[in-house]
Amino acid sequence: MSDETKQAAIEAAQAVVDQVSSYQYSAEDATIADQLDEGLRKAQVSLSDDERARVLDEIDGMKDEQSSAPQVRSAEPVE
């Protein structure tokens, strides 16, 4: 996979994370996870299980209203 393809996947995943973070951070954990998964599916990208868990944990940490949206470190296009 080219660096350009990988970067595009990370950017698409980041857009999803930003949207979920801004609209759903105060929602129930299951709702946040569902919204993240739906957004990633629509963007046709995926996160590894570890990356997904980290992102969800950081979104949950935003409930203190002092944290910013998590940064996606890696993502893959869905084939």
Image: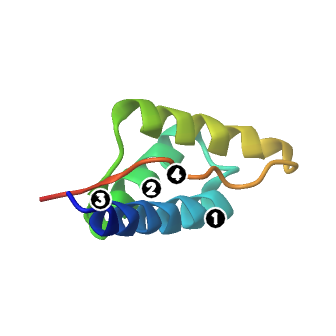
| Alpha carbon separation for disc pair 3 and 2 | 14 Å
* CA gap, disc 1 and disc 3: 20 Å
Residue toward you, 32 or 54: 54
Disc number for residue 23: 1
Q: CA distance from mark 1 to mark 2?
A: 10 Å
What is the three-letter code of the residue carrying label 3? Val
Q: Are marks 1 and 2 in contact (CB under 8 Å)?
A: yes
Going from N to C along the chain, the mark reached first, 2 or 4, is: 2
Q: Residues within 10 Å of mark 4 (few under 14, many from 20)?
A: many
> Residue 62 bears which disc, if any?
none
Quadrant into which the C terminus falls: bottom left
**Counting residues from the N terminus, which is met first, the one under dot 1 or under dot 3?**
1
Check whether the beta carbons of the residues at disc 3 and disc 4 lie within 8 A of each other. no
Residue that appears at 70% across and 50% down: 26
**Which quadrant is home to the N terminus?**
bottom left
Mark 3 or mark 4: which comes first in sequence?
3
Crowdedness of circle 2 by 10 Å Cα count: few (<14), some, many (20+)?
A: some
Camera-side mark, 1 or 3: 3
Of helix, strand and loop, which one carries label 4?
A: loop
- Give the residue number, with chain letter if any, for mark 2: 35
For mark 3, give the secondary structure. Answer: strand
**Gap between marks 1 and 4 measured at Cα:** 17 Å
Q: Who's the residue at 68% across and 55% down the image? A: 69
**Amino acid type at mark 4:** Val
Label 1 or label 2, whichever comes before in sequence order? 1
Q: Is residue 69 left or right of residue 40?
A: right
Q: Which residue is mark 3?
A: 45
- Using the image, tell me which numbered label, if any, was put on residue 72: 4
x 42%, y 48%: residue: 74
Disc 2 secondary structure class: helix
